[in-house]
Image (cartoon, rainbow, N blue to C red):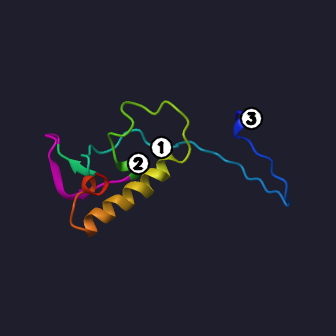
Amino acid sequence: MPAQFLSEVKTAPFYATPLVCSTLTIPFGLHVDNNSQVCTEEDEPIDGLFVIGNVQGDFFGKDYPVHCPGISHSRCLVFGQLVGEALAKDTVLTALIA
């Protein structure tokens, strides 16, 4: 890690745990529209079927070329909240962020 991103830890006790990641995120998933609604092969949204997080496709393009910890969880949190709000307000996700 570059030194500019490091900071000193001064207060004991100190703890460590191994971090083993085999899959950071899934670069593929179900085809969705701008409202996180699953689409058919004909690109038509399926009523009432929404996905978030790793299940949501069309996010990375063709692969996942960089190490980016937290992106999977952040997608779940952000899109989960947006889809939940849109459904609660009987609107579409794009109306909330426009």
How far apart, in angstroms, are the residues tagged by discs 3 and 2?
A: 31 Å
Q: Nearer the viewer, residue 92 or 41?
A: 92
Find out whether residue 45 is within the magenta segment.
Answer: yes
**What residue is disc 3 on?**
3
Q: Secondary structure at mark 3?
A: helix
Magenta stretch, residue numbers: 41-52
Find out whether residue 26 is within the magenta segment.
Answer: no
Say whether disc 3 or disc 1 marks the residue closer to the N-terminus.
3
The correct choice, above or below, for 92 with respect to 68 in the image is: below
Q: Residue at x 56, y 44 (%)?
A: 69
Point out residue 67 in the picture as x, y percentages from the top left corner. 56, 36
39 sits left or right of 72 in the view: left
Q: Residue furthest front?
A: 98
Q: Nearer the viewer, mark 3 or mark 2?
A: 3
- Give amino acid for label 3: Ala
The correct choice, above or below, for 11 with respect to 61 in the image is: below
Report if the CB atoms under discs 3 and 2 are less than 8 Å apart.
Answer: no
Say whether disc 2 or disc 1 marks the residue closer to the N-terminus.
1
Q: Quadrant of residue 2?
A: top right
The disc placed on residue 25 is 1
Q: Secondary structure at mark 2?
A: helix
**What residue is disc 2 on?**
54
56 sits left or right of 21 in the view: left
Report if the CB atoms under discs 3 and 1 are less than 8 Å apart.
Answer: no
- Give amino acid for label 1: Thr
Report if the CB atoms under discs 2 and 1 are less than 8 Å apart.
Answer: yes
- Give amino acid for label 2: Asn
Q: Residue at x 48, y 52 (%)?
A: 74
Q: Quadrant of residue 60?
A: top left
Q: Secondary structure at mark 1?
A: loop
How far apart, in angstroms, are the residues tagged by discs 2 and 1?
A: 6 Å
